[in-house]
Amino acid sequence: VATTAAPAQAATSITINGTSGGRTFDGVGAISGGGGNSRLLIDYPEPQRGQILDYLFKPGYGASLHILKAEIGGDTNSTSGAEPSHQHTRSDLNCDRGYEWWLMEQAKARNPGIKLYGLAWGAPGWIGGGNFWSTDMVDYLLSWLGCAKQHGLNIDYLGGWNERGYSISWYEQLRGALDSNGYGNVKIVAADSDWAVANDINSNPAFASAVSAIGTHYPCGYRSSQSNCSVPSAATSSGKTLWASENGSDDYNGGAQAVARGINRGYIDGRMTAYFNWPVVASITPNLPYPTMGLALAPQPWSGHYAIGKNAWVVAQTSQFTAPGWHYLDASSGYIGGNRNNGSYVSLKSTNGSDYSTIIETMDAGSAQTLNLDVTGGLSTKTVHVWSTDVTSGNPADYLVHTADITPSGGGFGLTVQPGRVYTLTTTTGQGKGTATGPAQGTLKLPYSDSFDGYATGTEARYLMDWQGAFEEVGCGGGRGGRCVRQMSPQKPITWDALSDPHALLGDMSWSNYTVSSDVMLEQSGYAELIGRAGAQDYSSTGGLNAYHLRVSDTGAWSVLSSNTNGTVSTLARGTTTALGTNRWHSLSLTFSGTAITAVIDGATVGSVNDRTWAGGQIGYATSQGETAQFDNLSITPGS
Ligand code: 147
């Protein structure tokens, strides 16, 4: 590490003034959910699983997040999967479902100071008779907070309905319910949508007192360069804390420029004091929507392969050098030389004491610039440590590098900043960059089988990713011992996006010729399906899936179907066999060999068709809406 103390010439002057006013910094966070994007992480082997968690949450190691925003599961798709509800029905309660509790615990274990924020995208259909803005939904959030308490997790922030507007009276009711149930310290964020809520906050004092922070999504542009983060004056003048409560939606490496701009400019342009990246990790298979978005990529628990993104290191350039509760120094934050293209800088002062950090980004600069920094207003005169990330580089060795230690002379120092970089100047120490690396990619080997017996009730079977509904471990029905997978949602959900039949997917996109077989038991009149060669999945318009299906009904009606993301379902073969009834176990199998597809029910071949639409992909289970079918003894054997 070089030591320099150079007064620069022809420089831009920046004063870091400890007496400057500025808003309180709330942190840099990321979102697990909205939805399903963390699903495969819990199935990772050690030590890789712990390494990924360290890179996300451990202070002085990686992204070192200040806030984790987690989905409150609703048994319905919320972008890249469905997350399970703690109450599939009104009378049901299980506080151990899914992976968000686990993830929050893991985050807290690494950083006890991390803040937690819960938000629902959808909800089980029993709530409010299908009305989200209902007393049932308030009660549902209270029971979720009760679950958090059981896990020893204090929830700091709670939202309403992701990107589906707001009900003023509902937010007021929620505030009252929190206060009267011992959750007076839980702050409400509204409305995880656009800025419209600001006008109502300004005109309605009761609403204003219910809401602590205005959280807006993509306030600097959706998946854009994040170059302009202006906020309407109604929001700035509301006196409320302002957040970019969802941002990102960019590739784990390719989003780094946008993240660098967004964190700084969100404050400079819009006085937003928290930035949340969507999502925290891309832990889903590559056929699903947004497969590489986040701070890290972890799509293969079977190989242990993972990759930490450039986005994480850009986040670290702020998160590792600040903490929630620090104060922005407005007089020491802005654009270099007043020109947006030169880059931006924000300065923050520690909560107690005189430490400071200045984060500079030069994403749009065309050439090197010399800065003359003056430190005043009671700030520390200690050595200034310089860390930087070369966002133009594809080499991880260029991210979060400790590049210099500067001894200020006469309260000042000079720094030359190159284009396309983030620099952090700080008097703090303790930063670091993890060194763990994961293994190479690999396929999920066939044969693959799961008896579903080795799990606790209420958990999710290994690698089985819910898309709609909730597929969960239960004691088997129909007189069978052991454990089975059951579709737990007995009603149509309050959706966030496109409704589809409940289904869950599993496996490797490289699978092509194979036989998938499973036992199945219907609990009500309706159908269950075995899915094969599943590929791309739509979430926003049709909920359609590229796949083949063997569908069987209690009546004995069966069909071999081909579906696609346009929402088209074509019948390749159909017929009727002996009635399957309910609460009786049956066996199904689907074999794919080149273009030949063979469907077998209870040992008898019912359909043989040729189709060349789908060449390979995952297996899956599906049910008709509200059908709580059970599945057992999954087996996938390689074919030719
Ligand atoms: C967000 C959702 O909140 C996330 O769950 C996820 O779906 C994410 C994917 O980019 O998008 O929803 C948005 C959808 C569209 C816009 C903004 C957010 N938009 O077009 O501005």
Image (cartoon, rainbow, N blue to C red):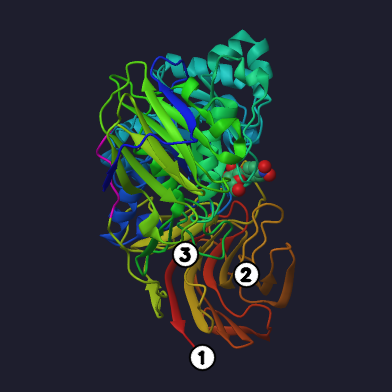
Residue named by callout 1: 640
Q: Secondary structure at mark 1?
A: loop
Of the numbered discs 3 and 2, the one sitting upstream in the chain is 2
- Residue bearing mark 3: 631
For marks 2 and 1 on the same chain, the one whose residue lies earlier in the sequence: 2
Residue 191, percent across and down?
A: 60, 28
Camera sees residue 141: no
> What is the three-letter code of the residue carrying label 1?
Ser
Q: Depth check: 217 or 147 in front?
A: 217
Secondary element under disc 2, as helix, strand or loop, is: strand
- At a point 53% along the width and 35% down the height, the residue shown is 344
Q: Residue furthest top?
A: 205
Q: Secondary structure at mark 3?
A: strand
Q: Tell me which segment is drawn in magenta.
A: 428-434
Tell me which secondary structure the magenta stretch mostly adopts.
loop
Which residue does the numbered mark 2 point to in the structure image? 551
Picture coordinates of residue 88, whole percent (x, y): 50, 43
User: Which amino acid type corresponds to the residue marked 2 in the rendered image?
Assistant: Arg
Report x, y in % for residue 332.
47, 24
Cβ atoms at labels 3 and 1 below 8 Å apart: no
Q: Disc 3, ligand 1: is the CB inside 8 Å?
A: no
Q: Give the number of the mark in front: 2 or 1.
A: 1
